[in-house]
Image: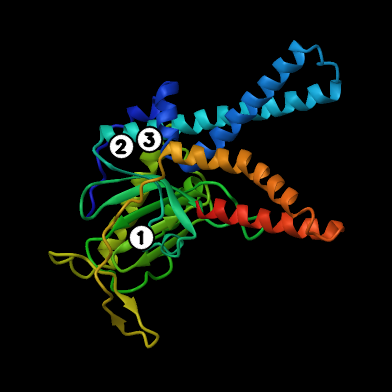
Amino acid sequence: MTAHPDLDYASLTRRGGVRGRLRAASTNNYLVMGGTMGALLVLVTTVVLIGLLATSNATDVGGLVVLAMCFGGGVYVLIGVLREGGRANAFGAFATANDLTLVRGSRVPHYAGSLFADESHAVHQSVRTKVDDFLEVGERFPTTSPGSSRQPNRTELFLRARLTGQATRAPHEHELIDPELHEALSRFAGPYAIEMSGDELTVFGSHELDVVRPGRVKEAFTLINELVNRANATLVASPRPAGPSTVTRPTPSGIPIPPPTRPQATTVAPRRPLTVIGWTLTLLIGGPILIAIIMSALDDHLPRTDTAARVVVSLMIVATIAVIARE
């Protein structure tokens, strides 16, 4: 049986100061990009407003309203980045205090869960116990564009654990989840899905983990511990032998075959914050300037129609989006 880890959850209540929040936010490229754009909005609108006041040209009410909206939007983004940085800082402190493995902003195709294996989702942040039969709780986020407006584009929780051996079969209905556990899981995770592949069990929930909300992380460890204990007791015939573990996958005929050795768990480090800031500024400032230069150079060679200009600009926008997606 897997033992529920005896952890100190006090550090989850301490989000740290501005420096700690910024340091934690710098490990997430999305937060770095958002913070750069927010700071740019605040800086540019402030400089423009000072210039208008200095030249006594701050008389256009409509223009001042637009400046105020841009400034407010930038402040809102920066507050959001600091708030997320506080959550990440608290989660990192929790991992340090309990000697847990911390994973942030990483694609993890070696995880058995289907949403990770196909790289449609990545780990936003998670913590994992440093034992072979580990328990892991965290948040995931989609790496692809939502297929519809109903598909959420936000972090959602996941729970993951390694069993003591290979599962010999799929669980029967209600074998792992009785009404009481189903109610607890539904309340905690919302609509959920449980996947088992080889010796890994993964739970994908539809709610956020909300790591700084009192009791959420502790409840996550309690629930995954209960699930893995039930799976070990009912679905694992014998403990895993010593040595590297593998995932057994069925063939179309139903006969299981051993696959290659499980890839080693590796965390892909995010790009350096200055690199992300540089790319963001290049796209926001250099992009429009480059489009203007190219359009000026092509002005004498394009047909005198709006269609030609639209085609050229559209191609440049597509190329820009491709660069952003790649980064």
Asked if labels 2 and 3 touch by Cβ distance under 8 angstroms, the answer is yes
Nearer-N-terminus badge (2/1): 2
Residue identified by numbered label 1: 111
Q: Residue furthest front?
A: 300
- Tell me the amino acid under the disc marked 2: Ala
Q: Secondary structure at mark 2?
A: helix
- Which quarter shows the N terminus? bottom left
Q: Nearer the viewer, residue 150 or 18?
A: 18
- Tell me the amino acid under the disc marked 1: Tyr
Q: Residue at x 36, y 39 (%)?
A: 218
Q: Nearer the viewer, residue 303 or 137?
A: 303
- Tell me the amino acid under the disc marked 3: Phe
* Residue 322, image x, y percentages: 58, 56
Q: Nearer the viewer, residue 126 or 57?
A: 57
Q: Is residue 91 above or below residue 163?
A: above
Q: Residue furthest left?
A: 242
Q: Residues within 10 Å of mark 3 (few under 14, many from 20)?
A: many
Q: Which mark is residue 91?
A: 3
